[in-house]
Amino acid sequence: KQEVTQIPAALSVPEGENLVLNCSFTDSAIYNLQWFRQDPGKGLTSLLLIQSSQREQTSGRLNASLDKSSGRSTLYIAASQPGDSATYLCAVSGGSNYKLTFGKGTLLTVNP
Amino acid sequence: GAVVSQHPSWVICKSGTSVKIECRSLDFQATTMFWYRQFPKQSLMLMATSNEGSKATYEQGVEKDKFLINHASLTLSTLTVTSAHPEDSSFYICSAFGQDSYNSPLHFGNGTRLTVT
């Protein structure tokens, strides 16, 4: 059974800092890995999707890496802003129905 | 970009009543939609996979007679919580693959906050 773990559970940083969020998964037989952002009481917004054959994806100030063999991914956020404050969720897709398994998320607070 | 609309955004109902939640893909067709449930400070848990024109596939431990799913068209899936109880209070979110492809990003609705009194 796939298990996804995200560390840290919560992170508070001053504005402008670069930061790294970590995600690990137990079963390396995945199709892809996605990072999502969730604002309080809202649905999820897809940030980056990395196919299993890829090593990283970039979008603006965000960079996500994937090391499938070791079951790890990181989300790097450069020059953080207060608007980046949200919960960041990692999810891996696998199995016969491409089911996504989610981590519990990292609650990020960027202080002005 | 792909948009998934979910309605209502919140609902309060009395114990024993049924509640229907709608999930629509606004600018694309979705043969498959997913229904998730999220408790406070917990991860999303997949409840069922909704397949257009056929029966939904439920995850282990999810009562199919309690959580009725209908996917009658390529743009609409509904989740009906029957005979709701306070323990069914939760945040329900639907999603679909934006290009109806399993290797494309998953797009989510804004969720429905259900409170059963």
Image: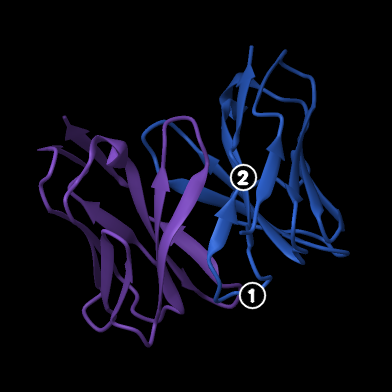
Chain colours: A purple, B blue
To which quarter of the image does residue B58 belong? bottom right
Q: In which quarter of the image is the N terminus of chain B?
A: bottom right
Q: Please check whether the numbered discs 2 and 1 fall on a single chain.
A: yes
Residue corresponding to mark 2: B109
* Residue B39 image point, x, y percent: 46, 34
- Amino acid beneath label 2: Gly
Task: Tell me which residue sits at (78%, 64%) in the image.
Answer: B29
Measured along the vertical axis of the image, is residue A12 above or below residue A7? above
Residue A10 versus residue B83 in the image, above or below: below
On screen, residue B24 above or below A111: below
Task: Identify which residue is drawn at 39% across, 82% down.
Answer: A52
Q: Mark 1 lies on which chain?
A: B
Within-10-Å neighbours for mark 2: few <14, some 14–19, many 20+: many
The mark nearer the N terminus, 2 or 1, is: 1
Between B117 and B96, the one lying in front of the other is: B96
Could you tell me if the residues under marks 2 and 1 are in contact, i.e. CB atoms within 8 Å? Answer: no
Work out how far the residue at label 2 is from the one at label 1, CA to CA, in angstroms.
Answer: 17 Å
Q: In which quarter of the image is the C terminus of chain B?
A: top right
Where residue B32 appears, as percent x and y from the top left, is 72, 64
Residue that extends furthest to the bottom in the rendered view of this protein: A53
Q: Position of residue B42 (x, y in %)?
A: 39, 39
Which residue is labeled 1 in the image? B101
